[in-house]
Amino acid sequence: MSDLVQLTAKDFKSDQEVRWCPGCGDYAILNVVQSFMPELGIPRERIVFVSGIGCAARFPYYMNTYGMHSIHGRAPAIATGLAVSRPDLSVWVVTGDGDALSIGGNHLIHALRRNVNLKILLFNNRIYGLTKGQYSPTSELGKVTKSTPMGSLDYPFNPLSVAIGAEASFVARAIDTDKKGLAAVLEAAARHRGSAFVEILQNCNIYNDGAFDGVREDKANRIYLEQGEPIRFGVEGERGVIQHEDGSAQVVDVAAVGEERLLVHDPAHREPSLAFALSRITLETDGALPLGVFRAVERAAYDELMGAQLDAAVAQHGEGDLAALLHSGDTWTVGAAG
Amino acid sequence: MRYTSFMSSSKPVEQIDRVVIRFAGDSGDGMQLTGDRFTSETAVFGNDLVTLPDFPAEIRAPAGSLPGVSGFQVHFADHDILTPGDQPNVLVAMNPAALKVNLADLPKGATIIVNTDAFNERNLQKAGYESNPLEDGSLSDYHVHAVALSSMTIEALKEVEGVTSREAERSKNFFALGLMSWLYHRPTEGTLAFIERKFARRPEIVEANTRAFKAGWNYGETSEDFAVSYEIAPAKLRPGTYRQISGNTALSYGLVAASRLSGLPLFLGAYPITPASSILEELAALKHFGVRTFQAEDEIAASGAALGASFGGALGVTTSAGPGVVLKSETVGLAVALELPLVVIDVQRAGPSTGMPTKPEQADLLMVLFGRNSESPVPVLAAATPADCFQMAIEAARIAITYRTPVFLLSDAYLANGSEPWRIPDVADLPAIPVEFATGDGDGFLPYARDPETLARPWAIPGTPGLEHRIGGLEKEHETGNVSYDPENHDLMVHLRAQKVAGIADDIPELQVDDPDGADTLVLGWGSTYGAIAAAARRVRASGRKVAVAHLRYLNPFPRNTGEVVHAYEKVLVPEMNLGQLRMLLRAEFLVDARGYNKVRGRPFRAAELEAAITELVDS
């Protein structure tokens, strides 16, 4: 990379007019992504954005990298083929709550369990935007929308719980308008070899405005997770998180329980149960929401394992010889004399 | 070259020109292995041959039951043959159920070799026999050899250490194989070597199977029940080196060859499904050819991953059968819009829905042509014989790569598992598949500009500096590839995509017609019916009638002379294992009054039924 040119955010903007609704949280995310990309030091041509269908899925059109706007829910599958056959690329999947957790739920969990080298950004706005306002798999129970006039009957998915349940090796959460927090999480995701799953809370100001106001607007309810630090938050750090003997985590007054009882964050913990417990802390249950990296463990990425098998096969059998393959098994020769 | 058995026979030998043998038994009796071995011996001996394995979808249906019967038919001859044979001349029945299931297929006078030990009351009852057919005279029209296969095998193995009598009984298929090898003068070295190799880790099993095999051979030689043995001289095949090959193996090798010829790494996305799974298994064992196989979470992901790999510059392939291919429709549609190479192999089986998983059918043709939303043109190819799968896999890849398009290649359950001798091509004679990735500094790069000849767009793979671009399922603007909702542009793009596929007609061979006598009736087929149609035509001609035969390997676009060919004949007959799908296309495209012969039984056509259908039309 001796001739590496220092890129800027502008280099990552495509010539296409951005067409999200004015005020959409997607703009903020796009800006942060375009701004932090140069810091990765990866040449533009080696970056690929793959998306499915939905508002978020328009994202690749606005990035001046390689990109594919594919099929509803299938981006992780398509990106898997690309990432597995091209370990030299930095492959990003941009998806939404419907795309990733409804129609594409199967592909998401399998990409995560395989630890395919993908950065998966799930823009969660808890609503279907592109189809104009039906409930999504993350909409709260009882949600009244055009398709649920009497309230949704579907118990919602917690995206992080799903990802951790699938044993993703990297799981994080950020807020669309929280530039610093989002950039930090994205950078950590980018540097993680393997599947990195990032839920980005994104406000849909048209169909589900204010869905995350409790943490998006009220910064005191943000629980920033820091590796090796006791988990505490609030204006004065007066609230914190403890873990009960049954494994569950809970928000408490630090003064009431004592600092020493606070849970110390360990995203590298071998077991995913700690991260899972943290994912269960929500605005609804605890009036606060953890942000940052929940889990980051090292595990061989899928493309590395596959590449190693290819190398081992060559070491064992030698480079494939087509003529020998065609002649494998019992052969017989018919002479010219007949 | 002379092949010898380990002993030579002292009994009278009769020369015959061909025979059809069917091995049948319980699915646990090892009939597929027995048939396979017998076929290998026959191939090495130099006969022409065609096989038809026929097994239940159930892995182990209840022992002794009718649904649990597994069969393997092999037809071999001293001349070139085209089908696995309509009716077996010899049936080896390992139990009453195998006899019951297969008896109706036998012509009167056929030979039946039964394992009498299995004809006990319990098995007879399971097979639904009220009395023992070996004793009640119901088999009087056949030559029955009653052989105590199980007990003689156990007897032969009683001195083998470490083998229980229960295990010994399981070697009875090798006894049967030995007996059949004696009866038809098959070379035996190959099977003995195979036993050594296959059971290398269990020397006592090697010993048991070897003894059983030899005991079967010796039984034929010494038993008075078998008065003569038969010789079938080697066939006069074209000079060259041969092997036997099944359709799925030929597809796998063809894909590897296409990877080599194009210089593109092969990526296979697949989900296990009968009868396509063995392609995934074959290719998974060829990692030293740089082959990446990905067993996906479902059929959708399998095709999606293949398309993603193609985007990255690999030869992306996905393999399945009809119930899986339906799930790939959206990926194929995306590949049509993205204009990227993708090879989709459909090993057809009987449907609808799950249908009959192990049985062949040709009823996916209209699905692969039209089973997508909107105007979504895709080239469609079909292999005609097991060995032809090799060539057609290369063709499918060549067209996909050259024209940046998804391509369907149709096979079926009969081609997949059936085998025939294959004259192994010289690798140096295989044509290269040129690939040009786009390069440039990016100034004025137009991802949807087109090659004037092929109408293919540039293949600019990630990693190429300066050519960063975005593609997707939304309609593209001509040349720029930008998202466009312009009505005229959409009309243009719909036409361009159609023209691109239609133009492939100029890049494929013309339809060859076999018409030595100047007939007024044409039989036009496609896919695995090739052998049965050709065999039927021979018989019709032998009866003094005239008939022309042609076989389509390209179904979209049709070869450029197809219209000319069908209009050159007064009568056109289209035999298909469906309700007339090609016939519908021919009628629509060429306004020809094509007639169908349509049977959808989940088994290949018999030459005799096609002979009757052709004769009737010729005489009409």
Image (cartoon, helix red, strand yellow):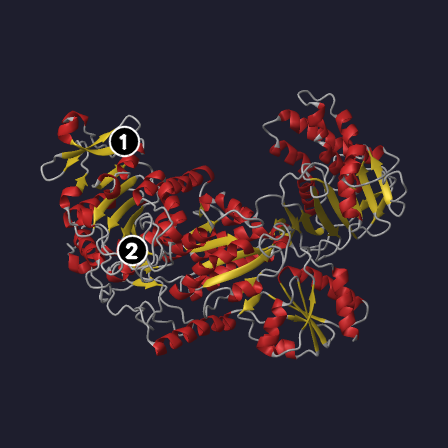
Residue A131: x, y in percent? Answer: 34, 62
Going 83% across and 45% down the picture, which residue do you hit? B111
Residue marked by disc 1: A269
Read off the chain for label 2: A
Residue hosting label 2 = A49
Is A103 left or right of B507, judged from the image as shown? left
Chain of the residue under the numbered disc 1 shown in the image: A
Helix, strand or loop at label 1? It is loop
Badge 1 and badge 2 in a common chain? yes
Q: Is residue A209 above or below residue B143?
A: below
Q: Taking B209 as reference, is A234 above or below it?
A: below
Tell me if B588 is positioned left or right of A220 in this view: right
Residue B593 visible somewhere in the drawing: yes
Q: Please tell me which of labels 1 and 2 falls first in the chain.
A: 2
Residue nearer the viewer, B277 or A269: A269
Q: From this viewpoint, which residue is outermost toward the left?
A: A236
Q: Residues within 10 Å of mark 1 (few under 14, many from 20)?
A: some
Q: In the rendered structure, which amino acid carries the disc numbered 1?
A: His
